Amino acid sequence: MKYKPWREMTEQEIYKLKKDQCCKCHYSYGMNAGKAGGLCDYLCMEGHRRGCSPLLCKEKGIYKPKRGQKKKKGVRPIV
């Protein structure tokens, strides 16, 4: 899959990426600051650059879910 360069993405595309992926990542912080908010703290936490676009974090294996975050399961029947 071919991705647009980061600088060519629209504000809406960046917001969607942050909402769907970045806000759930172990390396993110400041996600409550609205559309412009949310930063990747990979460099400070690991001591070196991420080495890829934020679009490719999951594919490259860099993305780590935040601790305590569980995947939503199906609706449980009421007994």
Image: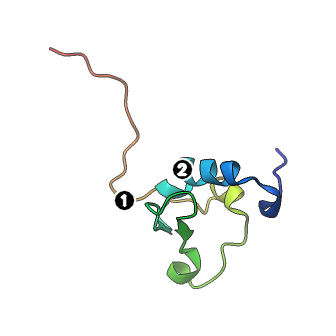
Q: Position of residue 60 (x, y in %)?
A: 68, 59
Residue contact at pointers 1 and 2, CB within 8 angstroms = no
Q: Position of residue 49 (x, y in %)?
A: 66, 79
Q: Which residue is pictured at 53% across the width and 65% down the height?
A: 38
Q: Which residue is pictured at 37% across the width and 31% down the height?
A: 73
Q: Which residue is mark 1?
A: 67
Residue 66 is left or right of residue 16, and the answer is left
Q: Which residue is pictured at 62% across the width and 51% down the height?
A: 17
* Image-quadrant location for residue 40: bottom right
Mark 1 and mark 2 lie on one chain; the one further toward the N terminus is 2
Residue type highlighted by circle 2: Lys
Q: Residues within 10 Å of mark 2 (few under 14, many from 20)?
A: some
Q: Quadrant of the N terminus?
A: top right
Secondary structure category for the residue under label 1: loop
User: Does residue 66 lie above or below 76 as drawn?
Assistant: below
Nearer to us: label 1 or label 2: 2
The answer to whether one can see residue 60 in this image is: no
Q: Which residue is mark 2?
A: 19
- Alpha-carbon distance for marks 1 and 2? 17 Å
Secondary structure category for the residue under label 2: helix
